[in-house]
Image (spheres, rainbow, N blue to C red):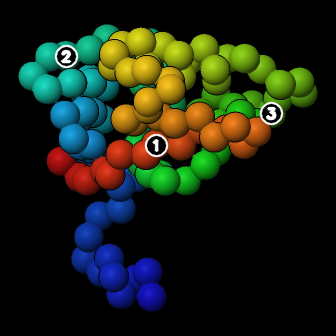
Amino acid sequence: MLRRSSRGSVPLSAAQALRAGALRIDRPARRVFLGDVEKQLTPRAFALLEFLMSHPDEVFGRERLLQTVWGFDAIVISRAVDHRVAEIRRVLGEDAAAASYVETVPGLGYRFVHPVERG
């Protein structure tokens, strides 16, 4: 059923650019824009935002994000994910209590909540 609904379209994970409202990332250039203003993220925060935007509405735990974005298994719970999420929110001017983009799912992890399109 999924193949029929998206036949011929590029998956978000393969798109050159992603857009979620006023937020846009340019993957090849590794640039983030909020409206017309370019925002600066560390490379790891960019990779985390890119991954979450590529999988909107999916919840990812810290361990999965460490494996996927950081590239290693966590022996203990690392706060690295939390620090990068806080950086993303700070740069985008987002309040954790009223998340427009990255939402904390208590006891589970994080998810990108805004609709995402190629572009």
Residue type indicated by callout 2: Glu
Query: In the image, which disc is placed on residue 100?
Result: none
Question: Residue at (89%, 24%) from the top-left corner?
Answer: 76
Expressed as whole percent of the image width and height from the top left, the position of residue 112 reads: 46, 43
In the rendered image of this protein, does residue 12 appear above or below residue 27? below
Q: Secondary structure at mark 1?
A: strand
Neighbor class of circle 2 (other Cα within 10 Å; few <14, some 14-19, many 20+) is few
In the rendered image of this protein, does residue 42 appear above or below residue 72? above
Residue, disc 2: 38
Could you tell whether 90 is left or right of 10 in the image?
Answer: right
Residue type indicated by callout 3: Asp
In the rendered image of this protein, does residue 33 appear above or below residue 18? above
Residue type indicated by callout 1: Phe
Q: Secondary structure at mark 3?
A: loop
In the rendered image of this protein, does residue 64 appear above or below residue 26? below
Nearer the observer: mark 2 or 1; the answer is: 1
Residue, disc 3: 73
Expressed as whole percent of the image width and height from the top left, the position of residue 73 reads: 80, 33
Nearer the observer: mark 2 or 3; the answer is: 2
Residue, disc 1: 112
Expressed as whole percent of the image width and height from the top left, the position of residue 103 reads: 52, 36
Nearest to N terminus: mark 2 or mark 3: 2
Cα separation between marks 2 and 3: 32 Å
**Residue 33 falls in image quadrant:** top left
Neighbor class of circle 1 (other Cα within 10 Å; few <14, some 14-19, many 20+) is many
